[in-house]
Structures are given as structure tokens and as C-alpha cells.
Amino acid sequence: MLDLSFESPEPKRISGATGDWELVIGMEIHAQISSQAKLFSGASTAFGAEPNSNVSFVDAAMPGMLPVVNEFCIEQAVRTGLGLKAQINLVSAFDRKNYFYPDLPQGYQISQLYHPLVGEGEVLVEMGPGVARLVRIERIHVEQDAGKSIHDMDPNMSFVDLNRTGVALMEIVSRPDIRGPEEAAAYVGKLRQILRYLGTCDGNMQNGNLRADVNVSVCRPGQYEKYQDSQDFSHLGTRCEIKNMNSMRFIQAAIEYEARRQIGILEDGGAVGQETRLFDPDKGETRSMRSKEEAHDYRYFPCPDLLPLEIEQAWVDDIAASLPELPDEKKARFMTDFGLTDYDASVLTADVANAAYFEAVAAEAGDGKLAANWVINELFGRLKKDAREITESPVSAGQLAGVIRLIKAGDISGKIAKDLFEIVYTEGGDPAEIVEVRGMKQVTDTGAIEKAVDEIIAANPAQVEKAKQNPKLAGWFVGQVMKATGGKANPKAVNEIVAVKLGL
Ligand code: ADP
Ligand code: MG
């Protein structure tokens, strides 16, 4: 059994003029389902296609067109639910959410309000070694995305691109268990990581494939705990919702600003009005988009074009059996199997491709700790310098393992290994062969080292006298020997021989 024990982090506190305040945050995350086709039509979901080229008659809401559920999208949502340890509802249903907007040809969005596909789950959000927030998931429902209005191409006209219309989204709704801006960003990061492990959403925030509506309220210390015990929202403050955030940095800035704005209102004796707000990244402020009174009345009702969605437990079980190892489990395993630190294991499991690369190196090199050091410090550092992904690494796992094997065998020193790594990175080739051909092998032959030490001692009598008075100066001789041997002498042997020859 995995040990995932942890302590909860302290909630973020802001001290105002009238005392301390705490933050309470709940998120609704829209994650685009990784699927080639849309939720109810066969049109392509390819990003960056010519505007309006991926629009079927269903997406364009031509009269008489009927939606047909894409089974693969449902499977992806079920997979996501299982990955979030959530309940899967064998019977769910689609509802129409009615509103008028030019990028919504149907005049309604097909969504799931009353009977979502996925029920309660949880996400463990780590904030440091052994410190984590357990954020409860309330539900995940499946729905269609809308199109995109374009207002900045022409001074007099607006355009619409319907390529995105009908693309499948999962809306992942959390309970208001997130207690600060850093936790909020970490929550999005963790969810993104899990979705990428599962392969159900690519998590590309820049393209809008993962975006968050952030609900923020403030309350006095102790109030959240009362809510937690009773599920009675009246213990919490009134929330504002900040719409459509697709950057972790902006999410944090928006929450920080919004909390202080609400505290200012409350401390002035006012009341926070429930409303939807937008974040302006240039000004670092949120501003009102619409108040509760102006909120849409969506007139939800069951979609008459679709039967309730019934799935079988056996199908869910099959999906469960095919789930990959998830981040928490992989991290725990890396710590026990390879003796890695919490930090190193976190770094290596941040992305599933990184983790796979590391495991391949560790297996071939037969040394998890060295493999972790080399992957994190040398390889990641070098790739970052070139803005490359692990999948574009010029050094394969096999080649890096080759470098590590040479270190372990004592054939090369750590310093030479770095030079060797750079050669493999820029020129390619087999590490063992490069060491052989370029004469990079470490000199462990004590005779050769002794000879070099003798020469340097003979040439520097004044230094010898000084070193005899002050043994710390022996390091100078070691340096000279290393220089004379082009860094190839075994440093441990050099140290020993220098000490003996100087009579220290
Ligand atoms: P709606 O459908 O109007 O957006 P929901 O009840 O579905 O309302 O809640 C939306 C989100 O708001 C959820 O993520 C929930 O956790 C969060 N939320 C609810 N109450 C609060 C509150 N007082 N402070 C912060 N977040 C809240
Ligand atoms: Mg909402």
C-alpha cells in the first residue's frame, strides 16, 4: 500500500485593518478532451486549421441535424474520472443550456447539469515535502465548446470561427477547498499533470485547451472549518467568479487582487456582490463583467435530441484496468525503488515523458541516484538552455546511461564525464567509443600519477616548504597534477600520492 500521508498547509492569511482574513477558492476547469473528432459530430478538432474548415452541419446547427455521442470522448471523461478517484455514474444525461451569442449557432450548449457523468473525486495538491492540500472534486460533466468571435480583424465587422464549436470539454468542478493563490496555481498544475498522464487532455493552456474559472471569497479565520464540517455555505463569504483564466501566473495575480478588493469592501462596511469578473493582465486588476442580477437565465432542460447516457460497469472496469501509473504513485515508487529525495522524485515525475526517460536511464545504468543526478542537473539544464523538450533530446537514454556506466566503472572522472556529455549532446556517438578514441580515460595507473607528482614537487621547492608548514596547500599540488594530466588522473589517487610524497 502506498504511503501518501501528509500535513495540510497553512491557509493564506491577509491582515486587514480590522483583523485577519482567509481566502476560500473553488475552481471550474474546462479541459478539452483529446479526441480527433468533436463530441456530437465527426468534424476534426485539429488546432490552427483554416477558420470554419472543421464545421459539420451538426456544428453549424443546420435544421434537422441531430447530435450523435462520440463514444471515445465519453471514454476519455470516464478515464479522467477514474484518474481523479471519482465515482462514475452509469446513468447520466445531457441538458440544453440556452443563451444567445453569435459564436453559438445552436442557441444552446449541450451540457450536463442534473446528472453529470462523473461524481465526487479528489486531487492531492503537494505544496512541499509531506505538505499537501486534498482538494475535493464535486463533479465532472461533459459539454460542447462554443466557437470564437473575432473582433480585431476589421474596424467595422466582427467575424466568427466555428472550428471550435462542438469540441468536447470536461468541466471539472472543485469544492471550495483551495486556500490561497499558490495552492490555486498548484491545483491547476496537478490537474494538468494528471490529465497529461491519462492522455485525456493535452493541457495546452496557451491554446486554451485548459482554462479555469476561479471563484474567490474571503472569510474570518475559523469560518472555513465550520463550512467543512457542515457543508453549509452560509459560513463562507460571497464569492466572485473570475472567468476564463489560462495562465498560472495570472490566476495567482487575479486571486491576490480579488481577495484584497473584497477585504477592502468588507472593512469599509460594504457587502461583496456576487458577480462574474474578468482579469486584466495589463493592469493586474479584476473588473466586473456582469452582476448576479444580470446573470443569464439559462433555462436548462433535458436535451430532447439525446437519450440518457447509459454505460456498463464492465466497460468502466476495462477502462480502470488500462489506467497508467499516476503521478502520486510514480513519485512514491521512485522514492522507494531508487532512493530518490522527495524533490528529485517530484521533478522527474512532473511530466510523464521525463519520468519514462529517467526510468530508462536508471535501468540501463543500473544506478537510480546517479541517473537522477544526471537527468536533472545535466540533461534538463542543457535542454532548457536550448528550449528543447525531453522528446527532442539529442542524447538518448541509452547514451546517457553509457556516460554513467563509464563513471561507475572508474573509466572517467565526474569532470571528464561533463565534457563527454557535451560531446555526445552536440556531436552524438557512443560514449565508450568517444572516450577510447579521444583518450579521455581516467589515469588510475599509480605509477603514472607518481611520476607527475614527482615532477611537480621537483619543480616547486618553495611551494613544498610552504605545504609542509600548512598542509592545506597540498591542494595546489593536486591541482597541478590534474592540469598536467588533462584532468584525467583519478583525483582520489592523486590526493593520496601527493600527501605521501609531501610527507603530510
Ligand atoms: P455556479 O454553477 O453558479 O458556477 P456552483 O455551485 O457550481 O455555482 O459553484 C461554482 C464554483 O464555485 C465551485 O467550484 C465551488 O467550489 C465554488 N464556490 C462556491 N461557493 C464558494 C465560496 N463561497 N467561495 C469560493 N468558491 C466558492
Ligand atoms: Mg460557474
Image (cartoon, helix red, strand yellow):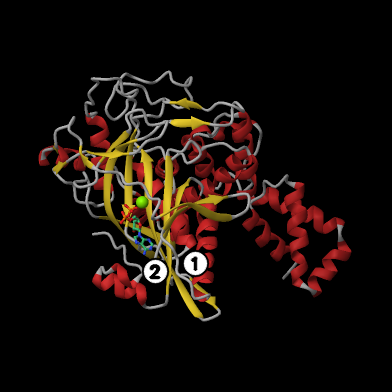
Q: Residue at x 44, y 51 (%)?
A: 189
Question: Is residue 367 at all visible to an observer of this figure?
Answer: no
Circle 2: residue type: Gly
Say which residue label 2 marks.
Answer: 237
In the rendering, which numbered label is found on residue 414? none
Closer to us: 335 or 37: 37
- SS category of the residue bearing label 1: helix
Q: Which residue is mark 1?
A: 262
Report if the beta carbon of the residue with label 2 is closer than 8 angstroms to ligand 1.
Answer: yes
The residue at 31%/24% (across/down) is: 61
Residue 230's spot in the image, x, y percent?
24, 72
Mark 2 neighbour class, 10 Å CA radius: few under 14, some 14 to 19, many 20 or more: many
Residue 153 is drawn in which quadrant?
top right
Q: Are marks 2 and 1 in contact (CB under 8 Å)?
A: yes
- Above or below, 194 relative to 67: below
**Of 461 and 245, which appears nearest the observer?**
245
Q: Secondary structure at mark 2?
A: loop
- Compared with 68, 345 (above or below) is below
